[in-house]
Amino acid sequence: MSLIEKRRKTRQISVGNVKVGSDSPISVQSMTNTQTQDVQATVKQILALEKAGCEIIRVAVPDMEAALAIEKIKQKISIPVIADIHFDYRLAIASAKAGVDALRINPGNIGEQKKIKAVVDCAKEHKISIRIGVNAGSLEKNIEKRFGITAKAMKESALINIKILEDLDFHDIKVSLKASDVSRTVQAYRLLAPKTDVPFHIGVTEAGGLYAGIAKSAIGIGMLLAEGLGDTMRVSLTRDPVEEIRTGFEILRALGIRSRGPELISCPTCGRCKIDLFKIAHDTEKALLERSSKIKVAIMGCAVNGPGEAKEADIGIAGGDGKGILFKKGKVIRKIDQDKLVEQLLMEIDNIENEKSGDI
Amino acid sequence: MSLIEKRRKTRQISVGNVKVGSDSPISVQSMTNTQTQDVQATVKQILALEKAGCEIIRVAVPDMEAALAIEKIKQKISIPVIADIHFDYRLAIASAKAGVDALRINPGNIGEQKKIKAVVDCAKEHKISIRIGVNAGSLEKNIEKRFGITAKAMKESALINIKILEDLDFHDIKVSLKASDVSRTVQAYRLLAPKTDVPFHIGVTEAGGLYAGIAKSAIGIGMLLAEGLGDTMRVSLTRDPVEEIRTGFEILRALGIRSRGPELISCPTCGRCKIDLFKIAHDTEKALLERSSKIKVAIMGCAVNGPGEAKEADIGIAGGDGKGILFKKGKVIRKIDQDKLVEQLLMEIDNIENEKSGDI
């Protein structure tokens, strides 16, 4: 039984070799927070993000030096790059010439028609797509005046920006409608959905740190995906961007849309637990991050209830008193000393992985 | 504009002095992971949880010593206590006599009718309520055989357990239907909702650590609350239970249902940011945890876009180059040296709090 309503019908566009929209997988993206012109630092961060599963990376292009750095960055990484540009159309053109795979601009912010046309002509020539990135905090003044800072205003801004590009016969567009609160974000996508077949980049902006950031992103992105709205996503956290990717895949997994690597279920422990389960869960989680098989692993506090409660897991451990037990599909296999639990669990996972074939 | 559908109509029950169901606030609960018989450790954890906003606390009662400890624990704490009992009806009776405010049992696991009746008579005498805690991992064998480990099986188990209690003319019931995956959890509550007016305790069980645990809980609990299903909640994390409370309130805040303390929005930073924003955001977040006013605070990376994007915040700071700026409702107030940003921001928040009246 899936929670997911039928996915919204959209056109399909390309960001480099990643397809976005229609029936393509919902991709997970992030944004670097290095100075883009610092090629070494930016490449290092992107490679870490690639390893975590990042499929599209955006970089800020605040000046010409950053635009020119894109060419060197692209040589050392594998995933497509989006240039994030505010206001200055020349930076968009320079980024395109530097080999960027897509632009994030708001045509309405670029200014005169001839500048917009220059960017669009350049995007056509280089066969790159454009994300219209509507943000509740930076709406066009006339729209904000008319509609306030509302979901409706965000929808109107998106429609105007889409029209600007489509009137120039440019259709390789995706659109985002981000606010820092879940409610307006979700409502804006709901309002825009019936008005266009442009694919949606979804996310809650400035969501915050770990607790608020993950909670707001998971609710906002989760509700949208459950309604079939969303073709690519970015989780926004005031944290290392690698954590954005990790959270993104956890959201997709929680909804049964995509999975990446092993799934760990673990109990919160209670007064029945006589083992340091937090450390065991933490060590196991860390070790499993490197793996790509689709195995389901359970870390349970209590040897009495644990194996039964986690009988759907391929493998698991449950705490006893100083000792733990190893179980498979709810059946107890053997007792293990507490300090060897993680090691032996990982060894057994190796064995299962050798039997199964892993895929991502 | 709210995302929330009309709340499901339920009967109202009491857990000590906390009302659950009908139009009472959606309460946030947690469970201790200390040995319950260790009164000192358990009280210490409950007091930390109270400070974080916990409104109901559950303790494991695996043996008679734990049941008897409840009396001493209750003397030193302020929030109601639920005794979590598996199988042994004598522990339920002892807990009730020790002054517990509610029981979590599954009547179907208690065994013979006369034992169930003894528990119910005791609950009536002490005027305490009962949570029926259905868990996908510990369904009655005959139900699991008939329906598999499914949302439907969970609903059936709940209905059978509700009937056992109601046939004994006991109605102070709430029910939970937890699975370790979001999909079955949400579906089970959806299936049960039209069949009873018993209030719902909601949550995803064994959700895991920080990323998976918050994401799964936020999506599952968030979707249910958005559909009007849910009267009290517990976020389950393999972490300090204080983090469960924090996550619970972030979920309620994200949905606009309840808020607790200041709201922090913060940007993820990008190549435009020339300041150590992660540290600033972290330090600010930590300081704000202690406060109870409903102020909205923004921590933005970029002095050019930040104040405008965060113009809905009561107050905020944005990073420049070595310096930062302080702004109120989008208007720049003054420049501040980077190393004084947090200190001066907190001082300004003091001033605003003195003007406003805080409430929780």
Image: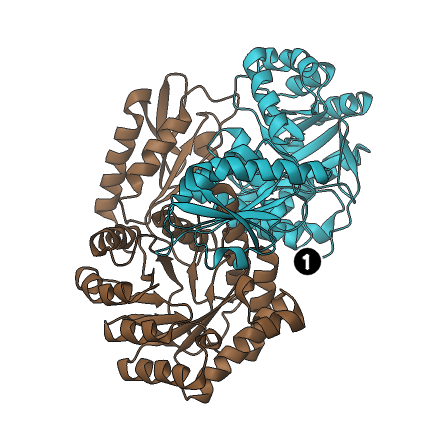
Chain colours: A cyan, B brown
Is residue B15 shown left or right of residue A249? Answer: left
**Nearest to the observer: residue B47 or residue A6:** B47
Q: Which residue is mark 1?
A: A2
Q: Is residue B240 left or right of residue A77?
A: left
| A276 lies above or below A132 | below
Q: Nearer the viewer, residue A342 or A205?
A: A342
| Residue nearest the viewer, comparing A193 with A280 | A280
Q: Which quadrant of the figure contains the C terminus of chain A?
A: top right
The tally of labels here is 1
Residue B360's spot in the image, x, y percent? 29, 56
Crowding at dot 1, Cα within 10 Å, few <14 / some 14-19 / many 20+, comes out as few
Give the x, y percent position of residue A204.
Answer: 54, 42
Q: Residue B130: x percent and y percent? A: 38, 74
Image check: A88 left or right of A265? right
Q: Check disc 1 and report its element: helix, strand or loop.
A: loop
Residue at 49%, 55% in the rendered image: A306
> Where does residue B269 sit, x and y in percent of width and height?
49, 27
Identify the chain of the residue marked 1, using the numbered disc in the image.
Answer: A
> Is residue A110 something that shows in the picture?
no
| Residue B329 appears left or right of B293 | right
The amino acid type, in three-letter code, at marker 1 is Ser
Nearer to us in this view, B42 or A345: A345
Residue A61 visible in image: yes
Quarter holding the N terminus of chain A is bottom right
Q: Name above or below for residue B320 compared with residue A8.
A: above
Q: Residue at x 51, y 21 (%)?
A: B272
